[in-house]
Image (spheres, grey):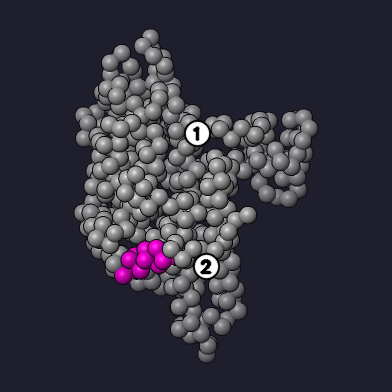
Amino acid sequence: MIDFDIPAGLAALRDEIRAFVVEQIVPYETDPRLTRHGPDDELRAELVELARTAGLLTFQAPKRFGGREPSHREQAVLFEAAGWSTLGPVALNCAAPDEGNMYLLGKIANAEQVDEFLLPVLDGRQRSVFAMTEPDGAGADPNQLATIAEFDGTDYVINGRKWLITGAHGARTWIIMARVAPNPHGPDGPTLFLCDGRTPGIELERVMNTMDRNYVEGHGVVRFADLRLPASAVLGEVGQALRYAQLRLAPARLTHCMRWLGAATRAQSIAVAHARTRTAFGKPLGEHQGVSFMIADNEIALQQCRLAIWWACWALDSGAKGRHESSMVKAYVSEELFKVADRCVQILGGIGISDDSGRHDFLRHARLPALRRPDRSPQIRDRPAGTALAVALLLGGRPRRRQRVVQGRIQRHGLVQAKQLNWAFCHRTVRDDNELT
């Protein structure tokens, strides 16, 4: 059974993180260094030093690296507190993509790679990127990976183009996904590489203009032009990139949800405060039935999202891979929190779409969860796993009969158009949770 009690020590750390964010980080939300492309490196460095002084920097790191190594369930409590401001995770060094990259490197990097590429990120001295998504290749389907690495027996020469690479400008630790071409010297296939962001052959074409401004230095378009890396740059084993990406995916899905939940909870608190003090037609807004309904719907949604996150974290802590659980939770939480943000704006009225409310930025940020991430297609990346699980659990019999039955049920209930489903998921077993999609 899941224990919903929060131990005293965890509650104390949660309160400490929340107080730190409220008192020291929230004032920076109007800092001009928070640009249309997110916080710049100068602002990030200043925030990181505040967290270091407070003894809270990279609190989620493993104990062997000086962190507190909270469980996934404990992270859910702490990351929600950090997310009270979208700058909170930046200061505490638990923001994407660094948080997920540190987790991955801690699992598969060798000792030399840890010293050169992981420890500086853990210490907040440099940032990292995960370069996978491509304009016409890998994205929701990483199997479409088009970036090629040619191996000559000594070095890998990488050529390709990536986009929506979060934090590319100024990052030093680069994790690059490329397809090793067939060669006579060894294995091939999708592979992860580690290198310094200053290595010749990495060209930042531009920083993209996107809806959000919460990720340090925004999202870049990058070209690899004859990027030459030694064999020692391979992260893990050649041909295993998709398996490693899955290792990173489930926890990273959930930490996104945790941070979003913190920001949404703050949005609700601002809306409630406004509804208590702003009057219309002789009484506070909150006493009007329509407004009270929205506040109640938000409270319900926030708690349901919190419980869903805790459930998936419990699954991970229990030893499950969590691929299906995290997929379902991220799809649900992202959409519900966007609805929460939208209702908060409705309660705030005109002030809700201005910077004066303090929530205009979160509304822009909240649209991102509904898209899952800027490099993902929501109906492709997060839906199929849940669809496959539902089909496998609810229906038996031959695949074609299964397809007809599910199509009929979906069409009757108006859930989605049947043609949108990837029926390949209905035909395969989901018993092996290690299967890559």
Which residue is disc 1 drawn over? 141
> Does the magenta run of residues contain 19?
yes
Q: Which residue is the extreme one toward the bottom?
A: 282
Q: Is residue 419 left or right of residue 98?
A: right
Report how far apart the C-alphas of labels 2 and 1 lie in the structure: 33 Å
* Residue 207 can be seen in this image: no
Task: Give the secondary structure at mark 1.
Answer: loop
In the rendering, which numbered label is found on residue 343?
Answer: 2
The residue under the point 21% across, 35% down is 198
* Mark 1 residue crowding within 10 angstroms, few (<14) / some (14–19) / many (20+): some
> Does the magenta run of residues contain 359?
no
Residue 150, percent from left and from top: 34, 18
Q: Predominant secondary structure in magenta? A: helix
Does 86 appear above or below 193? Answer: below
Foreground of the two, 161 or 250: 250
* Mark 2 residue crowding within 10 angstroms, few (<14) / some (14–19) / many (20+): many
Task: Give the secondary structure at mark 2.
Answer: helix
Quarter of the picture containing the C terminus is top right
Does 126 appear above or below 79? Answer: above
Amino acid at dot 1: Asp
Q: Which residues are magenta?
A: 11-23
Tell me which corner region of the image, top left, top right, bottom left or bottom right, holds residue 384: top right
Foreground of the two, 141 or 189: 189
Tell me which corner region of the image, top left, top right, bottom left or bottom right, holds residue 126: top left
